[in-house]
Image (cartoon, rainbow, N blue to C red):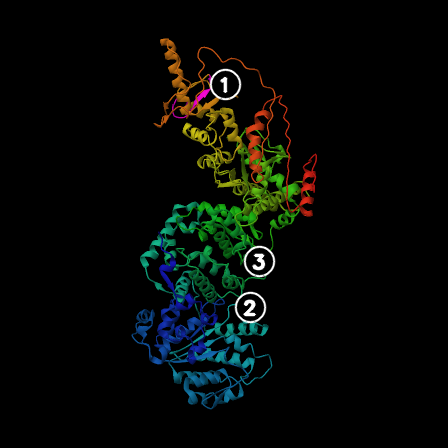
Amino acid sequence: MLKPWREVAIPHEDVLKGTFKQSEFAADLSRVHAGTATAEYQDPKLFFQRTFITEGMRLLLDSVVKRLSGQGGDPVIQLQTAFGGGKTHTMLAVYHLVSRDGGKAMVSDLQGVPAILDAVGITELPHAKVVVLDGIMSSPNQPVVRDGQTIRTLWGDLAWQLGKAEGYALVADADASGTSPGKAVLETLIGRYAPCVILIDELVGYVRQFAEGATLTGGTYDSQLSFVQALTESLKAVPNAVLLASLPHSDREAGSQQGVKALRALEHYFGRIQALWKPVATEEAFEIVRRRLFTDINDKAAAESVCRAFADYYTANSDSFPRDTQESHYFDRLMQAYPIHPEVFDRLYEDWSSLDNFQRTRGVLKLMAKVIHRLWKDNDKDPLIMPGSFPLADADTRNEVIYYLPQGWDPVVEKDIDGERAETTEIESIDTRLGSVQACRRSARTIFLGSAPSTPNQMVRGIGVERITLGAAHPGQQVGLYKDALRRLVDRLHYLNSGQDRFWFDTRPNLRREMEDRKRRFQDKEDIFPFIRDHVKKAFHGNGVFSGIHIFTGSNDIPDDWQLRLVVLPPDAALSKSGPSFALEHAGQILKTRGDQPRFKQNRLIFLVPDGDSVGRLKDQVRSALAWQSIVSDIKEMKLNLDQFQAQQAGKSLNGAEEALRRMVRETYKWLVAPMQEAAPGRGVSDVKWEQFQINAGTPHLTQEIERVLKENEILITEWAPIHLAKMLRDWFWKDDAKEVSALKVWQQTCQQLYLPRLKDEAVFKNTMGAGAVSLDFFGFAQGKEDDRYIGFTFGTCPMLFLDDALLLIEPATAAAYKQQIEAQRAAEEAGQPSPPETTSVSTNGGDTVGTGNITIPSPIVNGSATQRPTKKQFYGSIDLDPILAKKQFSDLVDEVLLQFTSRPGVKVEIAVEIRADSSSGFDDGVQRAVKENCNVLQFKSAEFEE
């Protein structure tokens, strides 16, 4: 298990608490010189602890040390790098090297400095004066007063800092007149107070304030240039004095036209004698950022383990990552950049630094400080901080990033890339496989970081798949997940573009916007539901255990027969755990009625219902597929004017939408709902209840998965033990006065009553009877009963079983007694003795004795049949019903009595219902009106109230 970066590299306290300020990232030379800077800049020890001495800075410090020691070195050094390239920070390094807090700090206390002195061959740096001229702090038309002396110009300030009043006296007239003191005076001034270092920061910012022909207290435009020329020339004559000046890198940084003009002129004068400074390399930036943002690496072994795991991961999946990751030095880059992934620096220094207002070092520090603070606060557990880690959902981080970009990026990030409402988040919430590693968000963040600074004018836009996986994937993760995520992103995102295996975000919507507009054309009933029905039908591979699968079928078209049927409800009859649920109401209507007739075989229906929380996404996915279909169709018919690339993208989007729809259908239709009732003998039957079971959407065959769920949860019985059948018979069918029951009736009752087991089909019932026939524990059989005699009686042997009206299931004690009496009668006949009485005492399998009067045993038929009796052709019956229990009693009456007649052909049945209600207080108008209206609807022949 790789250690998270947060356990190995601890950020500085200001980064942890989010108390860092933008100004603290900007080194301020004047504040340090005045003694008012923050400790990390003011204290030489802290400054060098947090400063990585780059190759360029080392060479510069080496030159300064040599110059001050009189061993050569460059007299004038121009610092000119990109915005935020570390010019002022380098000047501070020189400042602290020379001043050492007024001599309070030893050179040996300054981290990295002793090695520079050793290279030069000196043990102690001579004490030198430091002059700081800040073009932003100084005002061309606002003199300053120091110890009573008014100072107007840069050369006046230079002289005062070098020699106070005595030094100022050398340039007093030039300062008062605003004219350059000249090379000779400056040479005398600098030589008298050498060794010294002169640091001029933001010089262009000062000079550009002098308009052509205007005279200010600080002089004129020309006098400034004359001063610079004289100063640079004079330093050549003083062997232990050095000048460092910073100039902007670009015209944009120079500001106005006057600023650009000043920059060109200053570049000319400095160019005559300057030594150029080497800018910071990307690998050196690793350490610069790490020192500024992190205290230290407290577990170097863990850091090395993480970096080694990443390097091995890239090697093991060489086809999925850039070629440079396969080289041995990439491990070194990982170690140098830890805990930040090198790809972060590559993108920021190579891509983002191309933006005019993105400061090369300061911008990286500001952005990464916000990123690290947010990740720390969110308890980020990643082993490295990667492009895919950037918390763009955080408003502070997002605002920092898009600040450097043109207008229009905020909706791109919010809608497509990161946040609760982003498409990436929604995709991951649906596909937990992608959501488990945030594959969509991490990929989108990586694409954004690598493509947002690009412009439409670039020949090659975006980043390739290999760079995306490099910025997003961790060791131990399947690279294929991120490639799957990319396919989903291309299909879903509005601002993501792709071509030639490269991906980029743009502020302009892609072809998806056309698709979104077309989605609004399609209506639920006319377009969406039929499309879903077709795809649900395709999801089934045969009927499986069901005799019929009825998809979005009305109750009138669902047969009321003895076959097992699966009813698939439409999307507007969904089962919801969080909102309104119409599934049970819809299923209940189908369960109770077939059209306008009552449904009797209720235990033959099982329902597959959609998930209410997923229906909306399913319908949206259908609209997407239909929209892409229409776009592709219009392209083929030349109704849309698109280029070849867009046409290909439309085709790919259609394929992706249809594939996503197939998955979405399975994810939506994931609830099996089965009706049931709870009942116990003598305690009545409960209302209908609904058992709900979730099916696995990831299995390849929907039919087989439904069958598995039904079997595992015993909702459907495909194999039944005889002991369960015998128990059901004892509980519900064998009565004190009826020790046998029609097998056909039992089977039919299991198809009708929701409190009885739901058998797959008649064969399961017959197999169970056959399995129990050979035992004396469960039941006996007869092929009929006439008077008190069983016809075709068997017990303990398996007869030929035909499930018809004649087959009877006999209670085992009764069957045992009947069998014993047959055997006794036969034995008596063989011995020539009279037959035994018609009742006897037998021992049941449980050991209880059943004596005379407990069980009435029909007389056996031996060697003949009973005398034929006249056929009965009519039946009359009447019953009084309890008004409270009438519904249940009438249902039982239909099942137990009427069904015996209606199930036989040629039987004419008439039913008349008579209702009488009496009330001593009378019936109010509301009751009378309601009863009459209901009776009229139910087509009563007569319905009257009387006094």
Marker disc for residue 787: 1
**Residue for badge 3:** 411
Question: According to the image, label 2 marks what residue?
Answer: 252
Which residue is more in the foreground, 722 or 626?
722
The label on residue 271 is: none
Answer with left or right where residue 755 lies relative to residue 11: right
Q: How crowded is the residue under tag 3: few (<14 C-alpha within 10 Å), some, or many (20+)? A: few
**Magenta-colored stretch includes residue 128:** no
Q: Mark 1 touching mark 3, by CB under 8 A? A: no
Q: CA distance from mark 3 to mark 2?
A: 28 Å
Q: Is residue 443 depicted above or below 561 in this figure?
A: below
Would you say 74 lies left or right of 264 here? left
Labels 1 & 2 near each other (Cβ < 8 A): no
Q: Place residue 508 in its image quadrant.
A: bottom right
Above/below status of 848 relative to 691: above
- Considering only vertical position in the picture, is 596 above or below 493? above
Towards the viewer: 301 or 783: 783
Amino acid type indicated by mark 2: Arg
Q: Are marks 3 and 2 in contact (CB under 8 Å)?
A: no
Q: Amino acid at mark 1?
A: Asp
* In magenta segment, residue 773: yes
**In-image side of 499 versus 244 (left or right):** right
Query: Does label 3 or label 2 sit earlier along the sequence?
Result: 2
**Amino acid carrying mark 3 in the image:** Pro
Mark 2 packing: few (<14 Cα in 10 Å), some, or many (20+)? some
- The answer to whether residue 67 is visible is no
* Span highlighted in magenta in the image: 771-791
Secondary element type, mark 3: helix
Q: How many marks?
A: 3
Q: Earlier in the sequence, mark 1 or mark 3?
A: 3
